[in-house]
Amino acid sequence: MPVVESEDINWASGYPFPKAVPVEGMSRAWRQLMAGRDQAFQYLGARGQGYLRDWVMERTRDLRLAEDDFILTMGAIQGIDLAVRAVVDPGQSIVVQSPTYMEALEVFQNYTAHIVGVPLENRRFPIETVRRIIYQQKQAGHPVAAIYWQADFQNPTGVTTGLADRRALVELAAENGVWLIEDAAYRDLSFGEPLTSLKTLSSDSPVIHLGTLSKTVGPGLRIGWAVGSRHVVQAMDRMKKDLGHPLSEALVGEWLHDTDYAAHLQSLRASYQQRAEAMAQALDPLKEQGLIFESATGGYFMWLDLPEPWTSDSFTAQVRQRQLVVLSGRHFLLPGVADPRAVRVSFSYAPLTTFSEGARRLGETLKEATQGAEGRGLDG
Amino acid sequence: MPVVESEDINWASGYPFPKAVPVEGMSRAWRQLMAGRDQAFQYLGARGQGYLRDWVMERTRDLRLAEDDFILTMGAIQGIDLAVRAVVDPGQSIVVQSPTYMEALEVFQNYTAHIVGVPLENRRFPIETVRRIIYQQKQAGHPVAAIYWQADFQNPTGVTTGLADRRALVELAAENGVWLIEDAAYRDLSFGEPLTSLKTLSSDSPVIHLGTLSKTVGPGLRIGWAVGSRHVVQAMDRMKKDLGHPLSEALVGEWLHDTDYAAHLQSLRASYQQRAEAMAQALDPLKEQGLIFESATGGYFMWLDLPEPWTSDSFTAQVRQRQLVVLSGRHFLLPGVADPRAVRVSFSYAPLTTFSEGARRLGETLKEATQGAEGRGLDG
């Protein structure tokens, strides 16, 4: 992450906005937890841990087949790490969306040198490309073992995989004996209808589904879960030698026990939708200056395609001069991949009051480049 | 861990006793943390995280050489996991004390099939045996990459490695290019003089030192650290893709900021010493029935050698019938290793008021076996 100074407008951080975090509720949960004295500070035994487990069991019920199981993880990222360790050998390949969640790329690079991206084309990650990569990597002696996919409001692009593509992806995985690692971090933040999980499209369980409370409660709590066939979940559990996280699990469990989570989600969705719409509205006039984007339908992010002669990095640096922080599209790519000429902006965290001023700074920057390109021959 | 019922006397759990956990102090820290509103629930930014990092930097200063660095870990166990991943290849061997910390053995088995134990002999883990194993494993094509060692009040035996043996171990590691993973979980709980860390005996850094607050504050917080040469610590950091644990780190940081930790430790040491002496005193009469043990000089545990015809498991099961829970010595061994005919008892957690009654139950059990062995030909 770039350094953000207090006077900057921060459209970079993929955090929930401050009031989305249930600080009062967590303080109530803390006081209840402390009624159990030392228990939450020991390895086991605080009742909140049981509440959390029961809650995750209930929450993932519709995702699980008869032979499925689940484990708690530290956010989705530990689930990604454990899933890869359980199903990918070093000589095998992993298919990713390109761009994709940067932390996941860093995890994958710990385990294999064979990571192949499916480039974004017209705001879609084509399943045909996945099919081609599976074939090519097999020919090359590095068969694909896993596909890492965010189907819902993907980080960083906000792109959602359509139902037909979801079905095609699950079939492709099943046909080829490839694991699908479904990172559903943003799944609960749909502004419209709920989306169909890849996991529920699979009748023979080639999907490892990863969920998290990072986006809907707070990432600092580090609570997530992984759901999949018992065999693979047990393999992940054997690798998960961290003794869990009793204090955090118990705290969140106590909070969930006394929270109407459906109402909490409903309120969050309304807030994020309002934010997404406000940012799209603020940015709308910049389409005339060549900025291309689509309104978000869920999640935290928008992906702004930039006009020539900008590069992702030059634009990011230039708006940074105007004290607006965004993330360069290059940040979400493997080394050596062509510049997407785009930036990620987050509508999740910055105050709503920064949206028009942020848009103004983006506009000034775009204008400057056009003038620069015309007047001084700037070509990126 | 065995199931412990509420009416049982629990000499099994390696927990701090309830009043050793600073519940009030943590609640004060919580309130201070909440003054920062959502910050501790986000990925970064709560001031307690900075306090914790500064505190660990100061606390490990005497352990670090010029080129050394440190990272925070989830207790010592994540440090063990990351250290092994950084320095051990699957074809290589790990040397362990035998018996040793069971969770560490489970970690090691995820990475190599070549784990070799140094058996306890006369309450000492002979360094000569380490030397022989290094030679043998090299001959067998599975060179030793790391030695995992608890030099201070080892779990489960309570055995402390003497200074001459510490020097010999560090030299042996350096001579053979073998990493020493020093698990110093109980280091701060010495009833006498402070012990010399393996890390400070090493001038060329073949030691990865692991520390934790699990035994001195609370294991549920999951706060530990790893110290070693920058190169290996960076390798561990690359594997540590969990995004840290902001809430817990910030909470503990706030607590440390307002705590006289030296006084906290002094008070803990006095309490554990009192507990250790009380348990030794309670068990002393059982020496006449063939029980062999030494008084603890620090840490949480005593190791009770049993008379024939007991096995570790049969004795554990038999005292369990009398509602006393101890851990069988077998629990701390690799499969296939000879029964140590011993049990681990913890003086750290159970109420002091259980010590004489627990000793009475042990004595009854010992008596019964002797009678049984004489009267009914019981031979284990």
Image: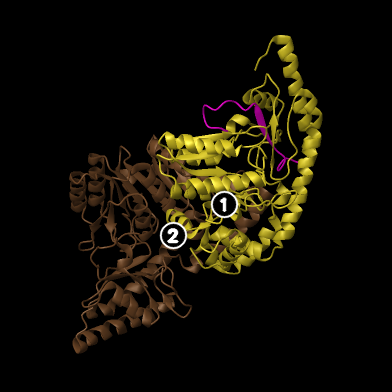
Chain colours: A brown, B yellow
Between B161 and A213, the residue placed more toward the observer is B161
Chain ID of residue with mark 1: B
Residue at x 70%, y 10% (from the top left corner):
B376
Residue B5 image position (x, y, % from top left) = 66, 34
Q: Which mark is residue A61?
A: none
Residue at x 54%, y 35% (from the top left corner):
B117
Q: Give the residue pinned by disc 1.
A: B210
Q: SS of the residue at dot 1?
A: strand
Q: SS of the residue at dot 2?
A: loop
Q: Are marks 2 and 1 on the same chain?
A: no
**Magenta span: helix, strand or loop, mainly?**
loop
- In the image, the segment drawn in magenta is B333-351
Between B61 and B217, the residue placed more toward the observer is B61
Chain ID of residue with mark 2: A
Q: Mark 2 against mark 1, which lies toward the viewer? A: 1
Q: Give the residue pinned by disc 2.
A: A215
Residue B380 image position (x, y, % from top left) = 65, 17
Dots 2 and 1: beta carbons under 8 Å?
no
Whole-Å distance between the Cαs marked 2 and 1?
A: 32 Å
Residue B183 image position (x, y, % from top left) = 58, 47
